[in-house]
Amino acid sequence: MKDRKPLLEIRNLRARIDEKPILNGIDLVIGPGEVHAIMGPNGSGKSTLANVLAGREGYEVTDGTVTFLGKDLLGLEPDKRAGEGVFLAFQYPVEIPGVNNSYFLRAGLNAIRQYRGMEPLDAVDFLKLAKEKARLLDVDDAFLSRAVNAGFSGGEKKRNEIFQMAVLEPRLAVLDETDSGLDIDALKIVAHGVNSLRSPERGFLVITHYQRLLNHIVPDFVHVLDKGRIVRSGGKELALELEEKGYSWLEKEPAGAR
Amino acid sequence: MNAVETFQKDFEALDRAGGPLQRLRRAGWDRFAAHGIPTTREEAWRFTDLAPLARQPFDLGRPSTNGIGSPPSLAPGLVFVDGHYRKDLSVLPDGVHVSSLAGALREDPRLMEGVGAPGEGEPFVALNTAFLEDGAFLRVAKGSRLPAPLHLLFLGTTKAAHPRNLYLIEEGAEATVVETYASAGDTPHLTNAVSDIRVGPGASLAHYRLQVEGPSFHFGAVRARVGKGARFVSNNVVSGGALTRNDITGSLDGEGAHCTLNGLYVIRGTQHVDNFTRLEHRMPRCESHELYKGVLDGRASGVFTGRIHVFEDAQKTDAYQASANLLLTDTATVDSQPQLEIYADDVKCSHGSTVGQLDKDALFYLRSRGLPEAAARHVLVRAFAGDVADRLEIQAVRERVDRILSERLGG
Ligand SMILES: Nc1ncnc2c1ncn2[C@@H]1O[C@H](COP(=O)(O)OP(=O)(O)OP(=O)(O)O)[C@@H](O)[C@H]1O
Ligand SMILES: [Mg+2]
């Protein structure tokens, strides 16, 4: 581990939606190879953080910086962020009727390759890659020829997100509640997919409500987000504590245990 | 001179030449002259303002042998310039009874009798009839089948062109005809085309109409009469023209006839497209399926009228109509209206119309996977247009439509 330059560095990030402050000064540093989990009550701003990182419209960043591999991430268009290696697995994946899953994914992959100055993959090579990743995630090949998420079950959509991640091989993957809606077997498959992508260069930000996922994807750090602020950080045991005691326990404890 | 004065001057010159078509032409002119260029006060023209046409004179296109730029041809076929057949540019397919209408009329001057007359409320068909001279003529004999699609290319320069096409698909015969309307340059011109179609009992015709002209005024009428148990499919694609009005009529004249109308228009800038479709269910147990889609960018405007007339005798009619429009900007507009007139009681008739914008969430989803904005928009527009585009059975036409979509969207 020669290069310990952080993958992602978030400093004092503040953001609002329609004048309403949602993120109130977030500091978070993710190093290469690390898995960070974010937990926190409904409405605390977890998805907002994920969306701001991916560049979704409608959020106004009022203060702070986000640096990704030394670059100012907030100044980049969403597709350029993908090109740089940021991937968001959506909490609510979007249905796009009329667009074939494999066409969609190849277009994305080739756009990212082009951004990086690489040759596009032709249909044959892409199919080979896609089938290999489909096997890894126990995804049916038929998935590829269906329209993007259209008519997919909740679990299938989540699995499709991780499948896309496996094909696109990002440097930083943000998984927003990918575990919700998954049955026990699917959860294991998804966790296996994530674990097989863990590598010394790659980082993960895993948003979840449940300790269960973290049994399979063991995090290096766990953070608790509340009212747009990280109120507690710790190791994987923090998640266990939260599972047992709930979030109200944190309010009773004096803050600042970071 | 304004447009009508110019039409009159050219009509009078043509009329002086006399000939066997004189009577029909005069009937056409009288009808047109009585109506004049329609105004927005007329119900059927409410959303299409022809004042710019009325001000602009276009001289009548005459037969010529002038060189033209490389014509955007799809395949061997017949080429017409300013409405007149160009033998030198055409490649006649083998074993098919196809010719210029002028040639066919020389052999049989009475060919247009009983088919050619303009109806009430068809001022541009009347005008076309006043200038009836040339176009394409196809006869597919009883029980036979065109081996390949017949391609017809109509090029406009700076003139007024009134091509008249006649397709006679006899009993049990099958054919596919592709009409492409394009401009030889980028100057304005006027196209006023009429295709008269007879699909005999048990026969089948797939008709394509691609309008990719430059800044033209374009009027296109398709008048199909569909016989007992026959099938007629109209595919109407528009991406060109400054102002376009198409009148597509399928008359279901025989029991169990079947008619499909597919439409797709993709426009931008200040382009205007008005598609007026009419389905006339005259006999029992006929079916019609209609799907029209529009993609509008810039300040473009679109109009869709879908009239379905079910006559008293047309029991067990099954008619389905849908129109959907995608507005890519806040300044593009669309007026879409079904007009149902149903005089039979045992019919199935449904219709629906939507106007929407690109789904922002879908756009972000695509971009988050690496697609630049233009490419992401292209994917979504292609998906929107997809169910019409994919119905185009000729690959070359489908590819052309895809090319139009990517040119238009810069993806
Ligand atoms: N588009 C929006 N318009 C207005 N308010 C919004 C919008 N998106 C999010 N919010 C508000 O921002 C706050 C944070 O929402 P966010 O989705 O980030 O929460 P979350 O932590 O992901 O919650 P959950 O655990 O339920 O997914 C909520 O109060 C929510 O109502
Ligand atoms: Mg959320």
Image (tube, coloured by chain):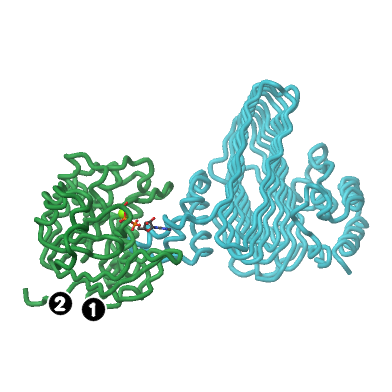
- Locate residue B231, reporting x and y percent: 61, 33
Crowdedness of circle 1 by 10 Å Cα count: few (<14), some, many (20+)? Answer: few
- Locate residue A234, reporting x and y percent: 12, 62
- Locate residue A156, reporting x and y percent: 28, 43
Same chain for marks 2 and 1?
Answer: yes
Q: Chain of mark 2?
A: A
Q: Is residue B12 left or right of residue A164?
A: right
In which quadrant is the N terminus of chain A drawn? bottom left
Q: Nearer the viewer, residue B198 or A155?
A: A155
State the residue position of label 2.
A5
State the residue position of label 1.
A70
- Locate residue B291, reporting x and y percent: 58, 42
Q: Quadrant of residue B373?
A: bottom left
Vertical arrangement, residue B72 with respect to residue A6, above or below? above
Task: Determine the colour of chain B.
Answer: cyan
Give the image quadrant in which the ligand numbered 1 is located.
bottom left
Q: Is residue B31 left or right of residue A28?
A: right
**Label for residue A135?**
none
Crowdedness of circle 2 by 10 Å Cα count: few (<14), some, many (20+)? Answer: few
Element under disc 2: loop
Q: Residue at x 40, y 60 (%)?
A: B364
Q: Quadrant of residue B155?
A: bottom right
Q: Nearer the viewer, residue B147 or B403?
A: B403
